[in-house]
Amino acid sequence: MKYILTAIIGMMPAMICGQTLRYDKPAQVWEETLPLGNGRLGMMPDGGVQMEKIVLNDITLWSGAPQDANNYEAYKQLPAIRQLLQEGRNDEAQALMDKNFICTGKGSGSVPFGCYQTMGELQIRFDHDAPINYERTLSLTEAIASCQYTAKGVTYRREYFTSFDDDISIIRLTADVPGKLSCRVTMSRAERGTTRVADNALLLYGQLDNGTDGKGMQYQAAVKAQLKQGTLTTEEHALVIKNATEVILYVAAGTDYKDAGFKSKINTVLKTVMAKPYATEKRQHISKYGRIFNRVKIDLGRGLDATTDKRLAAFYNNPAADNELPVLFYQYGRYLSISSTRPGLLPPNLQGLWANQIQTPWNGDYHLDVNVQMNHWPLEVSNLSELNLPLAALVKGLVTPGTRTAKAYYNAPGWVAHVITNIWGFTEPGESASWGATKSGSGWLCNNLWEHYAFTNDLHYLKDIYPVLKGAAEFYSSLLIKDEKTGWLVMSPSSSPENAFFLPNGHHASICIGATIDNQIVRDLFNNVITASKVLGEDANFSNELALKIKQLPPAGVISKDGRIMEWLEDYKETDLQHRHISHLWGLYPASLITAETTPDLAAAAKKTLEVRGDDGPSWTIAYKLLFWARLQDGNRAFKLLKEILKPTARTDINYGAGGGVYQNMLSAGPPFQIDGNFGATAGIAEMLLQSHAGVINFLPAIPDHWKVAGAVKGLKARGNFTVDFAWKNGQVTSYRVTAPTAGQKVKIKINGEIREIVASKI
């Protein structure tokens, strides 16, 4: 088949018009506001008519501080714990771990662990009422939000963006009748915040609690106004603007996280941006953002001409009427990734970088048993590869504290991180063994790091992360012991994240020998380290040692009597058949240890596992199941999960079970808001269209019936640093192009059921 790129490109313009979130009323709650971000700063305006409330964020704003919460005597209990597990006394082993194998101090429930916090709120009070023709939008192609309405014959318009050019937040207010714009600007914070006006700038500043002397991270936000016509006066805590035609509010903010001179930088950026025409700043912002966002385009067909909230309400029962909504949701996920991180900064946390609370749910931290990993799953395939680098930097920062933790609890070489971490490098177990003793976090993170190399073939990057991978492998290798029942090498103690099982005595426990996810992660990590060793020409002896141990590991999955993949080495009875975590399918995704082609029996067992688990759950769970079904090449079942996650909800309670969905602003609801559901679903949609984990680039591996009529994709990435464009009709690929950075690169592709080898075109 010849590729016809012009046919693909010709289908693309129709997609652009649909990449806007649109509403006909202001946000009534925070979960309806529109997220803006440039990787560091965040804004969420509500578009209020009489009172505009804009939540402000800085991704570095954390309470807490570095700490050492290791129990350096813990490792002495390891032989006793292992003996109890070997005797089947798991509950007693867990009780012993609760006494000796958890972190010291207050744990994650307080400082100094800390939490991600909102910076504060900006308020703009107007004297407008009874608006007509109200519209509120978020353009994904420009990263600009807006609202517009008419009151008393005057049309008012607002534009908001967090600039990708000068690292500042900007709000432009206009009236189409001269002199009709008046407002009062204030800022506030629920605690540890002071406001004042100095040199015509409204300031909000404070210092968070570090858990010791109270003198933790410092922050500041500064607002200045630039007017066309009208007057600006100041009060002690407000800027007052009267009779203007245009007002531009510049919001500069920062913290002293790795930046002692942040206050002078705030002043500098304000001076720089205010000397630049607004149109220039806006144009440069759109250009720099667009260089990243515009790499990928997808067309699945027509959409519903309605506001986003109405489209969401209609989609579940009539998805065929709005094939454009999944594209909007996919591109929204890419938008959120671009907006919540950038190289040199932090990776997105549980809420990306958007938070409206002092105490964010689950601290807004980095959970290492699926959540932070899921945040990064769409990046490589969605052509946002560089956005994986902040996670790599965070993980590199865990090696030194993780080395202390490995010694304290296991007397082991290498490094380990358990279930939770923060910007301060926390690697210790959590405060309860049932969830906090899971030690797959570091190995799972290494899979994310490896995927960046697999997609880019970046040798410089591989050299940089190799010590991280090797250190994790050294840790796990040292912990492997021979299981007396099976003869396999396994870890003891072990656990399947946040899940539990019944023991023969009726008690339940989480601690075990050789949980399936641990077995899979060790196998995957060892294989990747062996590959890296060969590529880099290093550590042949260590590589050979790992190769010998791989032969003694349990298989990627063990099938139980009822045909499901066992979650634990023993076929325990589950305490919750529909548990939100499905960790024993880690080998199916994100790893490629289980595939439809190479391990059909395990793939069938994975399907049965998913059938029993059910389709509901928190949003991130639904997204994970979508990914599993895509890997199993069942497009219609994957699409059913996509419908489930796109169910509208307004719930904000803390939820561990069924009930996930999305809010009106399309942010995913656990509930409450957790951004991993967005990112997991974004990865899942890409996985339905293109896969490359099984040694071939597979076109349309899990396309649902709803998308088969016609469609096109441009700019998705495949492992090996290939870029893929293609179009299809009636479920059959009609044109394609595969490109690579260098000429002559061969690659296997699977297209319309046929596997062939081609030479990729040079970019």
Image (spheres, grey):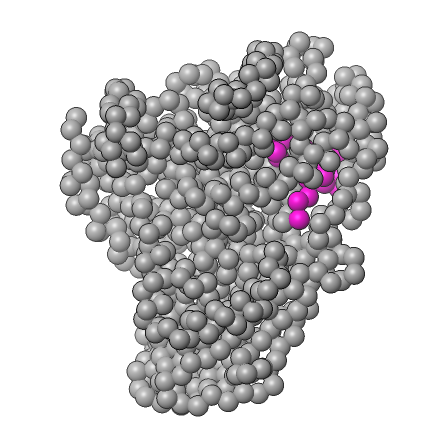
Tell me the residue at 53%/21% (across/down). Answer: 538
Judge by depth and name the residue closer to the eye, 69 or 336. Answer: 69
Residue 227 location (% of width, % of height) = 40, 83
Query: Which of 307/83 is in front?
Result: 83
Q: Residue furthest front?
A: 537
Give the x, y percent position of residue 626: 44, 36
* Above or below, comparing residue 489 to residue 202 in the picture: above
- Give the quadrant of residue 70: top right
Residue 71 is one of the magenta-drawn residues: no
Does residue 514 show up?
Answer: no
Q: Is residue 576 left or right of residue 211?
A: left
Location of residue 604 with respect to 666 vertically, above or below: above
Quadrant of the image containing the N terminus: top left
Find residue 201 and report its horizontal and vertical position in percent.
53, 79
**Relative to 212, 469 lies left or right:** left
Where is residue 205? Give x, y as percent. 63, 71
Q: Quadrant of residue 378?
A: top left
Residue 709 in the image: above or below residue 478? below
Pick the residue in front: 653 or 37. Answer: 37
Q: Main secondary structure of the magenta part?
A: loop
* Residue lying at 69% horizontally and 39% vertically, measured from the top left: 401
Part of the protein shown in magenta: 424-444
Q: Quadrant of the C terminus?
A: top left
Does residue 174 appear to the left or right of 263 in the view shown?
Answer: left
Q: Report the residue at 58% width, 32% height from top.
A: 468
Asked if the magenta segment contains residue 432, the reply would be yes
751, above or below 18, in the image: above
Is residue 161 in sight in this rendering? yes
| Residue at the image point whose x is 73% and y is 58% from the top | 210
